[in-house]
Amino acid sequence: MVGDGLDGDSAVLIDVAQRLLDLYPEFCAREPYALQRDFPGLSLASCQDAVQEAYLATGRLAVAGRLPQGTDLVAYLRRASRNRARSEIRRQTRADQRLLVRAREAPGAAADFLIRQDLLEGLVIPAIREMKKSRRRKVVELQSRGWSDERIAGELGIPLSRLHRDRYDALRFLRRKLARHIRAGLGKNHQHGKKGD
């Protein structure tokens, strides 16, 4: 029996550590894909790193005797992985913002590209996400990721003519949505022609 001849704390430590070791192969094989589904902005490699870091940090806690015997290790590891993924997203966002500030100060094509990227991520993609789920939304989502018309049509199983119509309809919706956002940002008053003005 595990822990024979050991005091209670040592037996708990060995039990928790052994359960943690037993979880390693399956958890580290599956969890990066679950993380990537929850955090599509992260690459698979970043998700794998988050899972490995969470596992190692949990292992250090187990070795230090800071995980009680009844701990649900799978839930603990998942929460730790998600916390690390969120930290990575925050780190990437800060890095992108610093890069954008530098780009605005630097003239040239690189600055234009980064400003366009900021507009895409700050305005266009949130507006796309507000669209109801439909094929039109899927078309512009895939296009915003840089997919070609042929690839999108193949993915959705539609002819190019249908794709062009769906994109046109989606862009009309997005133009209206973004126009309202721009007017609001400029402080335009939408109440026209009130009596007494």
Image (spheres, rainbow, N blue to C red):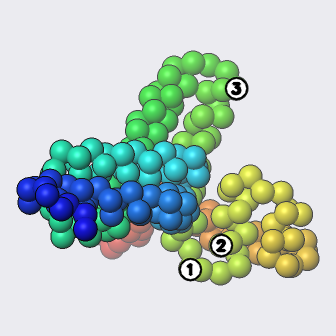
Residue 166: image x %, image y %?
77, 75
Q: Amino acid at mark 3?
A: Ala
Give the labeled residue for mark 2: 137
- Between 73 and 159, the one lying in front of the other is 73
Residue 190: image x %, image y %?
41, 65
- Between 47 and 168, the one lying in front of the other is 47
Q: Residue furthest top?
A: 106
Q: Amino acid at mark 2?
A: Arg
Q: Secondary structure at mark 3?
A: helix
Q: Amino acid at mark 1?
A: Lys
Give the labeled residue for mark 3: 109
Decide: few, some or many residues near mark 1? Use Cα within 10 Å; few <14, some 14-19, many ≥20: few
Question: For the point 59% across and 80% down, which residue is it?
Answer: 133
Decide: few, some or many residues near mark 2? Use Cα within 10 Å; few <14, some 14-19, many ≥20: many
Q: Residue furthest front?
A: 5
Q: Is residue 4 left or right of residue 170?
A: left
Distance from disc 1 to disc 2, alpha carbons, whole Å, reads 7 Å
Q: Secondary structure at mark 1?
A: loop
Question: For the point 50% across and 22% down, which residue is it?
Answer: 102
Q: Is residue 5 left or right of residue 19?
A: left
Numbered tag placed on residue 142 in the rendering: none
Give the labeled residue for mark 1: 132
Distance from disc 3 to disc 1, alpha carbons, whole Å, reads 35 Å
- Between 59 and 12, the one lying in front of the other is 12
**Are discs 1 and 2 less than 8 Å apart at CB?**
yes
Relative to 69, is 93 above or below? above
